[in-house]
Amino acid sequence: MRVYVKKLVPEARIPEKANENDFCYDVWAVSEEEVSPGVWKYGLGLAFQIDKEESFPAIQEHIVSTNGVQMTENHFINTDSFTLSIDLRPRSSIYKTGMILSNCEATIDEGYRGEVAAIFYHVKPELPRYKVGDKLGQIKIGITFPIEFEEKERLDNGTRGKKGFGSSGVK
């Protein structure tokens, strides 16, 4: 997957993994602003562009034999059939800060080219909050496919029916 990154300020850091097998890439704050009491906006100093065409070339390669001549046939993914995003989630150590990412997981839409920023509520002022230079989150690629919603009078019962909110008995 190829993602182009533009540093908007010199101190911005390109996302990186702490360990080779980590699922997400770490990101760091380059700016902080209290936008209202106890609400902090942190800028990453980065803008992103996902290159879908480069990232999703041929998915299958077939060898076609015609009159003794072998030709390669590629089948391409229709990159218009899905949308990608960069999803920002808080670090697992966020509990040490008393902060909460305002929308739990931020979605940076495929077409957005501005600076990526995150808003955190500082709900426990007795705990330290993030500062410029701190690792404040992790990013990953998200994908969504077009959904066609169809209204129906009845739905199948499924395996759970209408049971919810802890009805599975798992504690």
Image (spheres, rainbow, N blue to C red):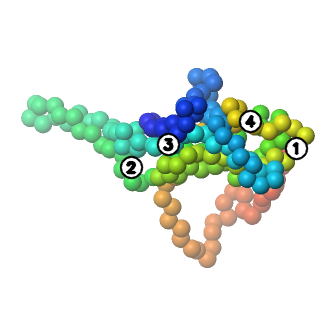
Quadrant of res 24: top right
At 74% across and 36% down in the image, what residue appears? 131
Percent position (x, y) of residue 107?
59, 50
Distance of label 1 from label 4 (alpha carbons):
14 Å
Q: Position of residue 63 (x, y in %)?
A: 23, 33
Secondary structure at badge 1 equals loop
Q: At 30% from the left edge and 43% from the top edge, which residue is drawn?
A: 75
Q: Along the line of sight, which residue is nearer the eye, 155 or 103?
A: 103
Asked if labels 2 and 1 touch by Cβ distance under 8 angstroms, the answer is no
Q: Nearer the viewer, mark 3 or mark 2?
A: 3
Label 1 Cα crowd, 10 Å radius (few <14 / some 14-19 / many 20+): few
Q: Are marks 3 and 1 in contact (CB under 8 Å)?
A: no
Residue linked to disc 3: 48
Could you say which disc has been placed on residue 79 in the image? Answer: 2
Outermost residue on the top side: it is 20
Residue 125's mark? 1
| Quadrant that contains the N terminus | top left
Q: What kind of element bears circle 2? A: helix
Structural distance between the alpha carbons of marks 1 and 2: 45 Å
